[in-house]
Image (spheres, rainbow, N blue to C red):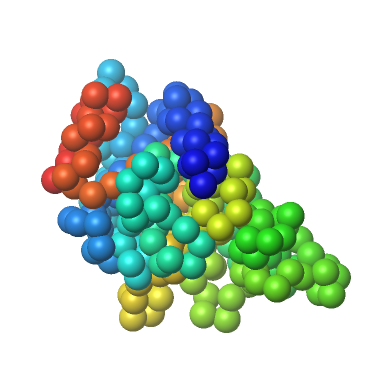
Amino acid sequence: MLKTILLLLISFLSSALIAAEQLVVVLSPELNATTASMQRYEKENRWVKIGEKTPVTLGRSGLGYVAFKTPLKNEGDGRSPSGIFPITSIFGYDQNTTFKLPYWHADENLYCIDDRNDSRYNKILRIYDKNSLPSSYEAMLRPDGVYRYGAVIGYNDIAQSGRGSCIFIHLNHSDKHPTSGCTAMDEAPLIELLKWLDPVKKPKILQAIKSECGKYKEDYEGIECE
């Protein structure tokens, strides 16, 4: 367990040290809250707000930590990860888009593997031979349409078994019920966010409870914690 936590922490710190010029800040009122607010920022001399604050939906159990604090984020716990993570790619049902980040066309062959015992754990990939599917996975072409637009959060990039997988920003459910560990929002602000994300600016997402936001302000001067 200690080795796993250390590996996750190294991955987290490595991600945090990569200079970013775009930051998405998600602030939750408390650890177990299932709703939060999202604000975009860009780096100038300090971090400057972009656009309006947007309500978002979190996991059904609130937020979970990467290391050293409980509750730890684990597979199937219904917690969205707390910390700073890269936003690595975009996915959706449209075959052609003008988004800047790398894009996954979510057709009937695109899957995200959440089977903790599979070597492809926490990977998005195309699987054409359905006999090779693991015991647990997410079909990216979902009947409820919440993956019609979305972005991949680079959580657990080292694919430590059982520490959580397939963490996304995606569309809200029609009744806005909590997610399984992702961050969800309405369509208009989500598309605005996806169009704004720029790989040259190394976009990241910071997710935290408001009472812990202050510890990030030294590295991200200008972000607001209310």
Q: How many marks?
A: 0
> Above or below — where is 224 with respect to 121?
above
**Is residue 80 depicted above or below 19 in this figure?**
below
Residue displayed at 65% across by 69% down: 137
Q: Residue furthest left?
A: 226
- In the image, residue 96 sits, relative to residue 68, either above or below, namely below
The residue lying at 50 percent from left, 32 percent from top is 10
> What is the quadrant of the C terminus in the image?
top left
**Where residue 63 appears, x then y in whole percent?**
33, 57
Is residue 112 toward the left or the right of residue 6 in the image? right
Looking at the picture, tell me which residue is in the foreground, 81 or 117.
117
Examine the image and state in which quarter residue 20 appears. top left
**Who's the residue at 70% across and 64% down the image?**
110
- Residue with the most extreme top position: 45
At which x and y percent is residue 77?
43, 66
Rendering coords of residue 140 (x, y %): 62, 68
| Residue 151 drawn at (x, y percent) | 51, 53
In this view, the residue in front, 154 or 47, is: 154
Query: Which one is in front, 220 or 55?
Result: 220
Seen at 16% across and 45% down, the residue is 211
Q: Is residue 10 left or right of residue 133?
A: left
Above or below residue 101? Residue 121 is: below
